[in-house]
Image (tube, rainbow, N blue to C red):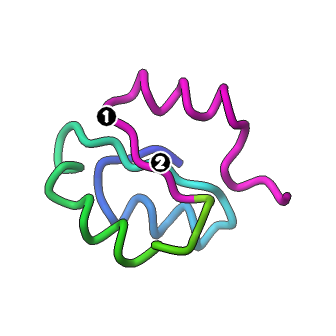
Amino acid sequence: MVGDKASDVAFGREQGMGAVLVRTGHGAGQEDEVRDRWADDRRVLVADDLWAAYSLIKRYGDPGAAS
């Protein structure tokens, strides 16, 4: 799940997916909340924009995949 709100990240995690918060749109204002709420969750990532989110997923694989 990629989105610019904490609610997007929450939805992804509730569905068992990894999640990437992008700092564009509402994301920059929601980053602290996301980092605090999912501080210990390696399946939640933060990226500058959609291209950076794509690059993270491509590099590390699905953040929601079981390890």
Q: What is the x, y in percent for residue 58?
A: 66, 26
Kind of residue sitting beneath label 2: Val
Q: Give the mark nearest the N terminus, 2 or 1.
A: 2
Most foreground residue, 42 or 19:
42
Residue under pointer 1: 48
Classify 15 as above or below 1: below
Residue 66 lies in quadrant = bottom right
Q: Residue at x 58, y 73 (%)?
A: 14
The question of residue 48 being in magenta is answered with: yes
Most foreground residue, 27 or 32:
32
Name the side, left or right, on which 3 lies relative to 1: left
The question of residue 57 being in magenta is answered with: yes
Question: 10 Å neighbourhood of mark 1: few (<14), some, or many (≥20)?
Answer: some
Q: What is the x, y in percent for residue 15?
A: 64, 67
Residue under pointer 2: 20
Name the side, left or right, on which 53 lies relative to 13: left
Q: Which residues are magenta?
A: 44-67
Give the total number of marks visible in the rendering. 2
Kind of residue sitting beneath label 1: Asp
Q: What is the x, y in percent for residue 41?
A: 58, 69
